[in-house]
Amino acid sequence: MINRLGKVLSLALILITLVTFVIGCAKTERPSPPTEPKVTPQAPQYPIHSATTRFRIATTTSLYDTGLWYYLEPMFEEYASVEMDIVYAGTGIALEYGRCGDVDAVVVHSRVDEDKFIAEGYGINRRYFAYNFFLIAGPETDPTAIKGLAAIDAFKKIAEEGIKNPDIVKFVSRGDQSGTHVKEQGVWQKAGYKYEDIQKSGKWYVEAGKGMEPCLLMASEQQAYILTDISTFTAYKGKLSLVSLVEAEEPTFLNVYAVMAINPDKVPTTKIDVANKFINWLISPEVQNILGTYGKAEFGKPLFRPTSDGSCQMEGCPTVEEYSKTVP
Amino acid sequence: MIEIWHGFLKAIELIVTLNPEVLEITGRSLLISASSCIIATFICLPLGSLIHLNNFKGKRALINLIQTFYSIPTVAVGLLVFLLFSRAGPLGFMNLLFTPTIMVVGQVILISPIILGLVIAALSGIDRAVPETAIATGANNFQAATLVIREARYAIYSAIIMGFGRAISEVGLALMVGGNIRGYTRIITTAISLETSKGDIELSIALGIILIVLALVINIVLNRLQQR
């Protein structure tokens, strides 16, 4: 009796495994994802793929965590008839992938690193396709009372109070040379601090070494302050016990996303034609419109602002040529 | 604690509704780990027999070295493979980085020491008299080796299952050389890593449970075969 039950059970389990195997290996369908934020109604279903070209991009974790790529990827794949692979990492690593030629294009948001990348000869055809602002998020109790202050004043206050009261005042840093981290270092510098001094000044300053979303979770757990881009913060606000304290739409907190192709003179195997197509597609009016509405339905306001509407008019904003001139 | 219960419920929901993305990554996990296990077995079984059945200078040292590599961290293997196969690296022309193929290659490198070492240990458990008698009665070396392997088959099955377990559960290598690309190189373990870092604990636990269930099913199947 037990033997027979055992046999039936084994057979059932074998069948389930085989079915799973077969369905898992079927290459014809790309199903809808289970966990990204709900998108505006016109999101297309994943098309059936017969393309054989694989086009690979490296993107920052901030951008990846907002779920924007889940939305844009199938659209570009259909438009260009390619299979798009998206690898995510901090800006530093993403550019490294570019230098090694392991990706065909990079999407990052650190002008300093981008300029270096272009000066080295690896990056070409940079175009800025979206922008938003950083903000300082923190605990609702706001122990240093930075709410409403200007960006640099807020940072100064956090540092002063943090050094005095490291148990109450904490700041979580990306610590990974990402675009956000580089921006953060820049703000400390503008506030009059040397970054090495900040790093050594006490346990109030937490260098996490992780992506944007895990760092936000850490800041939420520790009730700490954190510099974050508005898109990732808005997308994950529901999971966090943090509030936005300093939302300054000023050049210090400007966050501009750029896309660059990898230079075929430096990396002969790169897919430059698809990369150029991708860049032109990102700055095209249709996609710029979509970028401007992404997140509106779910979060009440769009997570990104398109560069093409000319609304970015402060110091550090891209010029008309930098955001709308198509690549030949 | 309540998350574990919710995770368990979510796992059942994902399995029963045959959630397509979960099925896709489960199938891919199974395919990659099973392939690497089979390839590693094909390499390590003959190699292990060769090492065991022959005496040579440095044999003890070689076995020690193999056993040392049981402890190699998966990220270390991942880094090595990444450097080798990156476009800028020596094997970059093969264009294998960020593909499922390179994940199989990496896992073969990872589990080979384990399967090799455990095969040698398994064969060591068989009395010297067995192959010696076989050769004395006219068998050639290959037949003698096959005989010893047959005698040690239960322990060798164990070695293979162990190798599979290491392959299907590793994250570091898959993440580094595969890139966790949705729809292409995402497997259960890398998905757990991503979902955990995004704070979706329920889904992570559910995927973990699915992985264990998968391993259980594989083991039951292999055990039935073992008992024949």
Image: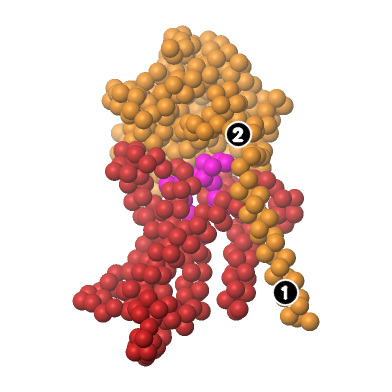
The residue lying at 30 percent from left, 23 percent from top is A265
Res A240 → quadrant:
top right
In the rendered image of the structure, the colour used to display chain A is orange
| Residue B184 counted in the magenta span | yes
Left or right of A31 on screen, residue A93: left
| Residue A34 counted in the magenta span | no
Left or right of A220 on screen, residue A210: left
Chain assigned red: B
Which is nearer the eye, A118 or A185?
A118
Q: Which mark is residue B210?
A: none
Is residue A67 positioned above or below B76 on the image? above
Name the kind of residue labelled 2 in the image: His
Name the kind of residue labelled 1 in the image: Lys
The residue lying at 60 percent from left, 38 percent from top is A236
Mark 1 = which residue?
A: A7
Range of magenta residues:
B169-189
- Report crowding for label 2: few under 14, some 14 to 19, many 20 or more residues within 10 A (C-alpha): some
Looking at the image, tell me whether mark 2 or mark 1 is earlier in sequence order. Answer: 1
Is residue B105 positioned above or below A126 on the image? below
Left or right of A140 on screen, residue A104: left
Q: How far across and how far down the image is residue A34, in percent?
A: 66, 42
Q: Chain for mark 2?
A: A
Q: Chain for mark 1?
A: A
